């Protein structure tokens, strides 16, 4: 592997119905990261998906669909490493070691578990509870330095940093004895932000755009056709005021704020830029411009996704190639972790097995 100054890792769950929030908050940013001096790894996190029930045939299709979305959006599988998590056994292996580093008290504070488990906590899977530990393993199996994620993953990234730091201190002398210097795992930087770090529902500016919202009008799916996209934007909830010319004027106007953020993210400009062009305009003028922009940006992605998903063999080959390259990196980390923790092993794992 060429020497890069950064290692970028991120993951998307194959749980169906990719929408504009996934695109602007994750996939589009993954594409942009490829311009940095970084090795980028983009993972379809199927082990995370099964923390809640997934129909097996549907899951297989969804893994291929997220992969197709990555490729259609412009992730280059020759430059970046694109793979699905279950093909690289080191993720689950490192998660076990981290299960013994992370503390119950840390996991008990995770707000996403509380939200997802809901009232019937006793009936949630242990995997759902352990989800953030597996996520730390995803990131640290590659000793990733940067992780582009949405706002909602901030707490999980903090847990990842806590696990890295506790491992580094608990095993400090063993880390040094094995020639890894002071610290083995980096303290990963989350990359949260951009004009659309949080894309909200088109029907309610206080709720996140979500695949599970019962109203399909609340979201733009990556597979929606041009007419559907335009219609959903036309029907998007707004308020009666024209757009302000300053950012401060978006305060307490969540729906206006959301549409301006979506426009900025799609156009690759700032909210300020959008208001410079549209300040004073009515939604009757802004919405058609936004619809045109959305159709021209998303239409080609939807078309390319349809073309790619028609050839699952090609997608599976991309994933297999990516998994092989990912494993080359992750196996080195796991060999070192086993030495540091005090396990006995056969030798360099990739040369003895597989
Ligand atoms: N939890 C992330 C989400 O739901 C997905 C994910 C799993 C992830 N492992 C990751 C994101 C590692 C970044 C890095 O969006």
Image: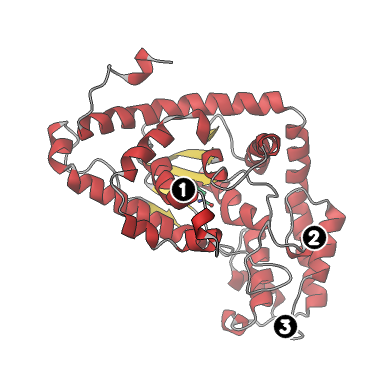
Residue ID at (46%, 64%): 111
Q: Which residue is mark 1?
A: 126
Q: Position of residue 225 (x, y in %)?
A: 83, 51
User: Ligand 1: does it lie within 8 Å of the C-beta at label 1?
Assistant: no
**Few, some or many residues within 10 Å of mark 3 (<14, 14–19, 20+):** few
Residue 19 position in % (x across, y down): 69, 54
The residue to which callout 3 is attached is 280
Q: Is residue 25 left or right of residue 58?
A: left
**Residue 1 seen anywhere in this rendered image of the structure:** no
Residue closer to the observer: 43 or 234:
43
x, y percentage for residue 235? 82, 70
Disc on the earlier residue, 3 or 2: 3
| Residue 109 % position (x, y) | 39, 63
Image marks 1 and 3: residues in contact by CB distance under 8 Å: no
Against 62, is 276 above or below? below
* Cα gap from disc 1 to disc 3, whole angstroms: 52 Å
Sequence-first disc among 1 and 2: 1
| Residue 246, image quadrant | bottom right
Camera-near label (1 vs 2) is: 1
Circle 1 packing at 10 Å, graded few (<14), some (14-19), many (20+), is few
Check the image and tell me how it is coloured. secondary structure
Callout count: 3
Q: Residue at x 74, y 27 (%)?
A: 311
Q: Is mark 2 within 8 Å of ligand 1?
A: no
Question: Residue under circle 2?
Answer: 292
The local secondary structure at tag 1 comes to: helix
């Amino acid at each position: 592997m060429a020497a890069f100054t950064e290692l970028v890792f991120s993951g998307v769950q194959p749980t169906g119905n990719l929408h504009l929030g996934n695109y602007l908050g994750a996939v589009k940013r993954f594409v942009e990261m490829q311009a940095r001096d970084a090795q980028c790894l983009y993972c379809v996190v199927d082990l995370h998906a099964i923390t809640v029930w997934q129909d097996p045939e549907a899951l297989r299709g969804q893994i291929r669909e997220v992969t197709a979305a990555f490729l259609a959006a412009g992730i280059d599988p020759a430059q970046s490493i694109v793979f699905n998590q279950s093909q690289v056994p080191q993720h689950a292996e490192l998660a076990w070691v981290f299960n013994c580093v992370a503390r119950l008290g840390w996991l008990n504070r995770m707000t996403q578990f509380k939200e997802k488990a809901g009232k019937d906590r006793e009936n949630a899977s242990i995997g759902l509870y352990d989800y953030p530990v597996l996520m730390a393993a995803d990131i640290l199996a590659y000793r990733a330095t940067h992780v582009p994620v949405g706002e909602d993953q901030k707490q999980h990234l903090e847990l990842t940093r806590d696990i890295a730091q506790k491992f580094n201190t608990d095993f400090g002398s063993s880390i040094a004895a094995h020639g890894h210097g002071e610290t083995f795992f980096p303290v990963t930087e989350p990359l949260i932000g951009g004009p659309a770090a949080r894309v909200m529902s088109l029907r309610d500016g206080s709720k996140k755009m979500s695949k599970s919202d019962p109203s399909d009008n609340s979201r733009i799916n990556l597979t929606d056709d041009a007419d559907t996209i335009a219609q959903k934007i036309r029907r998007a909830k707004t308020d009666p005021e024209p757009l302000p010319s300053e950012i401060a004027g978006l305060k307490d106007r969540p729906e206006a704020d959301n549409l301006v953020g979506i426009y900025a993210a799609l156009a690759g400009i700032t909210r300020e830029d959008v208001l410079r062009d549209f300040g004073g305009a009515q939604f009757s003028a802004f919405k058609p411009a936004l619809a045109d922009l959305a159709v021209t940006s998303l239409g080609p992605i939807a078309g390319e996704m349809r073309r790619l998903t028609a050839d699952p063999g090609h997608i599976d080959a991309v994933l297999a190639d990516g998994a092989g390259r990912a494993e080359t990196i992750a196996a080195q980390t796991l060999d070192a972790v086993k030495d540091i923790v005090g396990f006995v092993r056969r030798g360099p794992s990739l040369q003895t097995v597989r």
